[in-house]
Structures are given as structure tokens and as C-alpha cells.
């Protein structure tokens, strides 16, 4: 791997430092699943574990190394101890692009109180570790633990010595999250100016978030010349965590004017990665977390909603689709204005005259005063059955099914459009409802996914009316509900589907929100 003026390498340590988060331990199968997602993201380096720490960690590194191939560098951690380095090398044997990550403390606190060695001894051990690691692999990263609290002159000495011993990447960790952007940036700049051979290696930053500055410190490091960032999904990691990958990558992407560098990360995979890691580790993501939090693209205030509905960028700097977040969401609360309510109703397929809308708006405000959030189902209940029919594009005129066992379920439907034109078509299916839906699809030709189907009896007895509720998802990801009631649940199902399709079609035809505000 060589340095570049315009590319920053992304080193993911979710599986190593991230796993050090209390309660976040993962088994080998889970780590493999995450490593596959890291490859979809396009990370440059996967730090797969600390092989000497346990047989499970060794096995995870071994399996990930074998599976990743040349899609990414696979890295294993070790202390500056021969047994650690040998174990890391063993675990990486099957890797196409192996890297050993080794290092030692460089702050006075680590030298005196943890390692109880002199500076000279630390340099000796660092150099020996790098040399030993180089005897196994070509790519060796050296970490100067607690560099954020080290005396800069000693750090320069250590880094120059390990570069001389063959390190290809030098990692400057702010292990305790003590630094802040100006100081950390100056530390990296100092290395660039004072260390012989620094231009031949990649300088890496590894920041912890104890003061909430991991992202800012990493970015300051990049501005000063670092070209690798060590980070984790959701900022998982020891104590307050590491730099969050989604934050640094999006900062670099959104502000080329400030940083002038980019990564090769497929940012559209961020939300998926975040959910996967959160699901596996059980570490929940706070709703207001940057980039991947549930509220990252949710707008609650009426003023913001009005702005976003007119032009998304008035209150959003990132297009949610760029991080795989679907779309912006308008949260309907008592603070929402008319524009937001009208927009949501139109999305659900309810297009109404002003007078009718005012009645719904009044009812909405009453409900919103009682509830924190007003959901689609609440709006549907407010609008009621009569309004649900407004804007009907197709009317279900008749439906016939043939089914049995043995037999191929077949259905014929007739739909009439709002100009009175009749359409008849037939289809077979896996069952009678499937056959009916396929026949309707042949007429309406509006691709969608059926995501929910439920039947409920709304009256008692053998002749009960069955109400079918379904949800369909349109090609652009919007969800529409349909309901239909009849004594024959096949007919209820057909009515529910036509009802949902009508909403989808009305929403697709609805005038733009700007016209309505
Ligand atoms: O925070 C740290 O210093 C580390 C090193 C092992 C790289 O995680
Ligand atoms: Zn760390």
C-alpha cells in the first residue's frame, strides 16, 4: 500500500477494538458476517482480531484471512512480544494481503506505570518487534500506544527507529482520548516535519472518544498529513469508543473544500452496516447519532418540515440515499404545520379539497396534543372510509376464482377505471389470493412488493365479514395500506389490494408539495 495525496485509507477495527466494548463480544460466525459487510463497504484494511488473546480470536482471524482473499488487507494485533507476533503470523498464514500490527506504549504514564521500562528499552523492543514481524510479512504497522499523551520528541525518535526497522505504516493513537484537534493535528504535522523516512510510510490515526473528539481529532490528523484512519462502525470501541467510520468518511466526502481527500468507501452501505453491527453486538445506536441514527434525517419542527418539503437541502446537508438511509422523514407532531400534514396525506393517497382538509387538520391537532407522534394508521383512522375512496383510479367490479385440490388456482377480475373503461384479465397463482393479485397486476401494471397481509373478522359467526389489511411497497420505497371488507375473504383481499394500488397511483399523480404550500 502506498501513500497518496488524495486518498485516505480506511482501517476498520470493529472486530478488534470495537469488540473491546464491554458486552460487545462476537463469535467467529458473527465476525465473518461483519467482515462481509466491511467488504461491501470497501474498507482497505480489516483488523480481524488479537490472535494471542484467545483461541476464538485466533480462529476468527484465520477464517477471515482465508475468506477475504485480496479484497482487503487483513490485519492482526500483537504487543511487542515475540509470542504475540508469532501467533499473529500463524493466524494470518492464509491471508493474501496480511498485516501484523504491533507496538508499545510511548507516554510517560505507560513507560513508568505500566511497562516499567526506560525510553531506550521501549525503542529497543519496538524495533525488535517490527523486525520480527517483517520476518513473517511484508506489511507491518507499528502503533505508538498513548501517543496522544507522549512527549513529541520521544515519539519522533520511536517512529524514526521503527521506520528504520521496516514498518510500512505508523499508527499514532490517541489511546486515552485526551487530545483535541489543534494539538493532535500539530502532533501529526510535527512527525511529518521531524521524522526521517516518514514520507515513505503511511501515517495512521487511531483516536478514542473519551472527550467526544475522536472524529475531529482524526480529521485534524488527515489535514496534517495522515493518510489512514482507524475507525469502527457506530464508533464502537473501548470505553467511549473509537472514531466512527460513517462520521469521518462522510466528513471527508461532504467537505472536499476543507480536506481535499476522499476514500473508496461505498457510503450507501453505512446504514446496513450500522444495523448489522448493532444487531450482533446488542449495542444500540442512539437515535440522534450522526449519519446512522434513527433521527438523522427526521424533521419534527413545522418550520424545518416546511423547508425540507420545499427543498431538502434547506435542512439536510447529506442526501439520506447516499448513506443508505432510505429518505428524509417528516415526523408528524403537534409542531407540524399544514404543509407537512398535506404532504403526508398525499403520500398516503388522500388528496382532498381545502374544506375537507381543514376538518382533518383540526382533528389532527387534537390528536397530536394527546400523542407524541401521529402515525400513518392514526391519519387513516382520521380520514375514514369515505375519504379513503376519494381519488379511486380503479374500481373492482367483479372477481371469480377457481381453486381446489387437485387444481390450479385461477382468477378472473374486472376493473373499471374512472373514465368507465372496463378491463378484464385472468391469471393463475400459488393460491386463490395470489391468482387474484396477479390478475390485477396484469391490468394495473404498477410494480410493488406486498409486505404485509392480515385478515380479521369484524363480525361474529360463520357469515362474519372478513376485513383484509395489506401493505404494499412502491418501487421508490413508499408504503401504502389497503383495506377491504366482504363476507368472502377472497373478495376482501381483492378490494384491499385495489385500495392500496389506488393510493399508490394517486400518490404518484399527486401535485408536487411546492404547489400545495
Ligand atoms: O488505542 C490504542 O492505542 C489501540 C492500539 C492497540 C492500536 O487500540
Ligand atoms: Zn484503540
Image: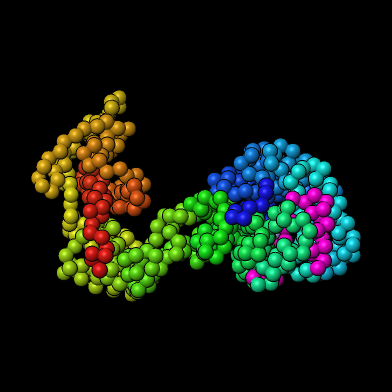
Q: Position of residue 113 (x, y in %)?
A: 85, 68
What residue is at 79 percent from the left and 64 percent from the top?
155
Q: Is residue 447 magenta?
A: no
Task: Indicate left or right for 462 with 220 as reference.
Answer: left
**69 lies above or below 172:** above
Q: Position of residue 303 (x, y in %)?
A: 35, 73
| Quarter of the view holding residue 412 | top left
What residue is at 63 percent from the left and 44 percent from the top?
72
Task: Indicate left or right for 286 with 310 as reference.
Answer: right
| Quarter of the view holding residue 511 | bottom left
Direction top: furthest residue: 406
Nearest the viewer among 95 and 488 is 95
Quadrant in which the C terminus appears: bottom left
Task: Indicate left or right for 209 with 312 as reference.
Answer: right
Nearest the viewer among 57 and 157 is 157
Q: Position of residue 165 (x, y in %)?
A: 83, 51
Q: Position of residue 468 (x, y in %)?
A: 28, 48
**468 lies above or below 182:** above
What residue is at 34 percent from the left and 50 percent from the top?
476
Residue 272 appears in the figure = no
> Magenta region: which residues?
153-181
Task: Indicate left or right for 95 with 430 as reference.
Answer: right
| Quarter of the view holding residue 13 | bottom right
What residue is at 9 percent from the left and 45 percent from the top?
420
Counting every numbered tag in the picture gives 0
Amino acid at each position: 500500500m502506498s501513500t497518496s495525496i488524495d486518498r485516505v485509507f480506511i482501517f476498520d477495527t470493529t472486530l478488534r477494538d470495537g469488540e473491546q466494548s464491554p458486552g460487545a463480544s462476537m463469535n467467529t460466525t458473527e465476525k465473518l458476517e461483519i467482515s462481509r459487510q466491511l467488504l461491501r463497504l470497501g474498507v482497505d484494511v480489516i483488523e480481524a482480531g488479537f490472535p494471542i488473546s484467545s483461541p476464538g480470536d485466533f480462529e476468527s482471524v484465520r477464517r477471515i484471512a482465508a475468506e477475504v482473499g485480496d479484497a482487503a488487507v487483513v490485519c492482526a494485533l500483537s504487543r511487542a512480544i515475540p509470542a504475540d507476533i508469532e501467533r499473529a503470523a500463524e493466524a494470518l498464514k492464509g491471508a493474501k494481503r496480511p498485516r501484523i500490527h504491533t507496538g508499545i506504549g510511548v507516554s510517560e504514564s505507560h513507560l513508568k506505570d505500566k511497562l516499567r521500562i526506560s525510553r531506550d528499552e521501549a525503542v529497543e523492543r519496538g524495533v525488535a518487534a517490527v523486525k520480527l514481524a517483517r520476518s513473517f510479512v511484508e506489511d507491518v504497522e507499528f502503533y505508538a500506544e498513548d501517543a496522544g499523551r507522549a512527549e513529541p520528541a520521544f515519539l519522533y525518535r520511536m517512529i524514526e527507529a521503527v521506520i528504520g526497522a521496516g514498518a510500512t505504516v505508523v499508527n499514532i493513537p490517541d489511546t486515552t482520548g485526551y487530545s483535541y484537534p489543534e494539538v493532535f493535528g500539530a502532533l501529526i504535522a510535527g512527525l511529518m516535519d521531524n521524522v526521517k523516512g516518514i514520507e515513505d510510510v503511511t501515517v495512521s490515526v487511531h483516536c478514542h472518544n473519551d472527550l467526544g473528539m475522536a472524529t475531529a481529532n482524526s480529521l485534524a490528523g488527515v489535514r496534517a498529513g495522515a493518510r489512514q484512519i482507524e475507525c469502527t462502525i457506530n464508533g464502537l470501541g473501548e470505553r467511549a469508543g473509537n472514531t466512527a467510520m460513517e462520521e469521518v468518511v462522510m466528513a471527508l466526502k461532504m467537505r472536499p473544500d476543507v480536506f481535499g481527500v476522499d476514500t473508496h468507501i461505498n457510503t450507501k452501505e453505512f446504514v446496513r452496516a450500522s444495523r448489522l453491527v448493532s444487531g450482533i453486538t446488542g449495542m444500540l445506536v442512539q437515535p440522534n447519532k450522526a449519519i446512522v441514527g434513527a433521527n438523522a434525517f427526521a424533521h419534527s419542527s413545522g418550520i424545518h418540515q416546511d423547508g425540507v418539503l420545499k427543498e431538502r437541502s434547506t435542512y439536510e446537508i447529506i442526501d439520506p440515499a447516499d448513506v443508505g438511509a432510505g429518505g428524509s422523514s417528516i415526523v408528524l407532531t403537534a409542531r407540524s404545520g399544514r404543509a407537512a400534514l398535506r404532504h403526508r396525506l398525499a403520500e398516503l393517497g388522500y388528496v382532498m379539497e381545502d374544506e375537507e382538509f381543514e376538518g382533518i387538520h383540526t382533528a389532527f391537532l387534537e390528536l397530536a396534543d394527546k400523542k407524541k407522534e401521529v402515525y400513518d394508521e392514526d391519519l387513516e383512522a382520521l380520514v375514514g372510509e369515505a375519504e379513503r375512496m376519494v381519488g379511486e383510479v380503479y374500481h373492482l367490479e367483479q372477481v371469480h376464482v377457481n381453486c381446489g385440490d387437485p387444481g390450479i388456482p385461477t382468477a378472473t377480475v374486472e376493473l373499471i377505471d374512472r373514465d368507465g373503461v372496463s378491463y378484464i384479465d385472468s391469471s393463475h397463482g400459488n393460491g386463490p389470493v395470489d391468482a387474484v393479485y396477479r390478475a390485477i397486476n396484469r391490468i394495473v401494471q404498477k410494480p410493488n412488493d406486498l409486505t404485509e397481509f392480515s385478515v380479521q373478522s369484524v363480525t361474529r359467526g360463520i357469515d362474519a365479514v372478513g376485513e383484509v389489511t395489506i401493505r404494499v411497497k412502491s418501487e421508490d420505497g413508499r408504503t401504502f395500506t389497503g383495506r377491504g371488507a366482504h363476507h368472502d375473504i377472497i373478495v376482501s383481499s381483492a378490494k384491499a389490494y385495489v385500495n392500496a394500488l389506488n393510493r399508490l397511483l394517486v400518490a404518484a399523480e399527486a401535485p408536487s408539495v411546492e404547489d400545495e404550500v
